[in-house]
Amino acid sequence: MATLTTDIQTEKAFQKQPIFLNAKVKAGVKKVGTKDRRWYKDVGLGFKTPRTAIEGNYIDKKCPFTSTVSIRGRILTGKVVSTKMTRTIIIRREYLHFVPKYQRYEKRHKNLAAHCSPAFRVNLGDTVTVGQCRPLSKTVRFNVLRVSSSKSQQKMAKQFGKF
């Protein structure tokens, strides 16, 4: 039992999922141990709760599926350009800006920091959908809701597998 909890604990402080009021077992029903119970929620807006959030054993107080962080405001998509930080990714959003003087468009981009829950496996080049939430840190105001693997990386992996 002790080895199971040490695998989950990666932070300096002991991490545990708080017991929520709606997760209590009703009287007369077979009681389930607190170790077996895992609280999760549906963030709404048509996003499904990942299977790893329901069945997993990670603890993340900033996860939109297993904590009290709510998604409200904007829903954005972008391409992952950096995964070097712990549980934080940088996504790049490209757009066109119209220049009236020349009647032309120019390419512009914005980088956006987003919290990535351990429920997701994110690689460089993946397309992610993020939702706005309360400020989680100095620069992070978005949370990852969905990950779409990039098709080009899958094709490259298949080609490389042939050799």
Image (cartoon, rainbow, N blue to C red):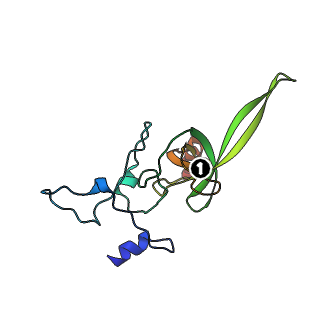
Q: Farthest bottom residue?
A: 2
**Foreground of the two, 24 or 77:** 24
Q: Specify whether 157 is left or right of 61.
A: right
The image shows residue 18 at horizontal and vertical percentages of: 37, 62
Quadrant of residue 58 in the image?
bottom left
The image shows residue 85 at horizontal and vertical percentages of: 61, 61
Please name the residue shown 40% across and 54% down the image: 53
Q: Specify whether 38 is left or right of 117.
A: left
Q: Specify whether 146 is left or right of 84.
A: left
Please name the residue shown 41% across and 75% down the image: 6
The image shows residue 86 at horizontal and vertical percentages of: 58, 62
**Foreground of the two, 127 or 142:** 142
Quadrant of residue 4 in the image?
bottom left
- Dot 1, crowdedness within 10 Å: few (<14), some or many (≥20)? some
Q: Which residue is mark 1?
A: 141
Kind of residue at badge 1: Arg
Secondary element type, mark 1: loop
Q: Is residue 97 above or below residue 138?
A: above
**Foreground of the two, 76 or 158:** 76
Please name the residue shown 39% across and 63% down the image: 17
The image shows residue 73 at horizontal and vertical percentages of: 54, 39
Q: Quadrant of the N terminus?
A: bottom left
